[in-house]
Amino acid sequence: MGEEGFSADSSLLYHRGVPSAIVDASPWDLPDQTLTENRPLLPRHLKLHDLVGEDWKAADAVTGRRLVLGNADVRISYVAAGQPSPLYRNAIGDECVYVESGSATVETVFGVLAARQGDYVLLPRATTHRWVPTGEEPLRLYAIEANSHIAPPKRYLSRYGQLLEHSPYCERDLYGPGETFLVEGTDVEVLVKHRGSRGITGTRYVYPTHPFDVVGWDGCLYPYTFNVSDFEPITGRVHQPPPVHQVFEGNNFVICNFVPRKVDYHPLAVPVPYYHSNVDSDEVMFYCGGNYEARKGSGIGQGSISLHPGGHSHGPQPGAVERSLGAEFFDELAVMVDTFRPLELGEGGLASEDPAYAWTWAGRGPAR
């Protein structure tokens, strides 16, 4: 199993059976993948917890996903699940799934991963797996699906791929599968998300024997978890720009996290971010813990997304600068995705939008 046409990371998996053997194939109709242009160009506030009802107990982490935002490089979905998912693999790109709350066992062809609150679960493209919730509360997942591979930023890596000492995390913070995971079974269904001539589509395969038949594997390509609490924040006397918060990167997008940290310690520092216009990117913040000082008064809270598109300058809410003066520590937790192509709204984004957000800096909206 290898990336980039036999010229990048790979692993050898030793199967008992024939991994190519299938006995049936039929179309799999994916959850709604429709995208709607962000026009007129507006900053958006999406309240993802509004997407969750009592039916979460019957939902699973794959077929229950609701598309929130997306473009040609990356798609962001949200789900609250209470049931084991079908066997599944994404043949389009890697997945980075953030566990907002709850816990799960992630069974994979490589072995089993334990996933808990705050984990990023990195699943390489075409890794057959399934999610099995293990707690009484909903398993809330923020799924970032790439059309490429997802990896640590290159500036954190040596030329041989080792995480360098200035990186905010290292290899001992990454947890891969332990022992192999063997399952018996016949005529086993696997859902495959893949490329089609008109975009993303799906196929339901039936395998004569269970795909979890790998008795051993070796190599540098495998799924793993990384917990956000193990990220060591980079701080400074004055405000540090968002790249210091970066944790992963994909083609035409980056993933960052804002964690509890000591803030700017120059005596004249203003700890909250300055107003800024990211002329080359759209910025998506998923607020998943603590108190986000810059957003007080905007309606944003736990489970919110803010979308600040390129072409619109943004920054702290009125009064946030003054309230931040003298602060020494921010107790906040957020996952940020910056994209270099414009993001569009999925059906989950449209269903969860707070229409008042765009006018919160001015204090009033259009007179209609």
Image: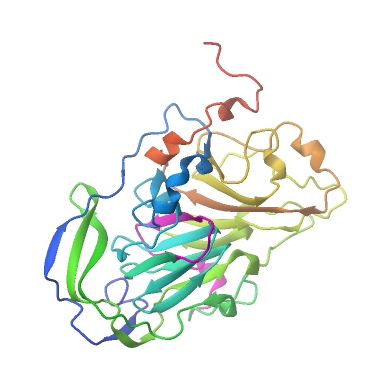
Residue 85, given in percent of the width and then of the height, sits at 36, 61
> Is residue 125 found left or right of 244 in the rendered image?
left
Q: Is residue 140 magenta?
A: yes
Specify the quadrant that holds the N terminus: bottom left
Question: Could you tell whether 177 is left or right of 130 in the image?
Answer: right
Q: Residue at x 67, y 58 (%)?
A: 259
Residue 213 appears in the picture as rendered: yes
Question: For the point 53% across and 45% down, which residue is it?
Answer: 283
Task: Give x and y (percent) for residue 354.
Answer: 53, 31
Q: Residue furthest top?
A: 368
Color style of the picture: rainbow
The answer to whether residue 3 is above or below residue 351 is: below
Farthest residue, direction left: 23
Which image quarter: residue 367? top right
Q: Position of residue 350 (x, y in %)?
A: 42, 34
Up the image or down, 350 lies above or below 146; here it is above
Q: Residue 216 appears in which quarter of the rendering? A: bottom left
Q: Count of labels shown?
A: 0
Segment tinted magenta in the rendering: 133-159
Image quadrant of residue 325? top right
Instruction: Name the residue nearer the viewer: 139 or 348.
Output: 139
Residue 158 in magenta?
yes
Q: Where is residue 30 drawn, in percent x and y?
A: 27, 50
Examine the rendering and report whether any part of residue 345 can be seen.
no
Vertical comparison of 190 with 287: above or below? below
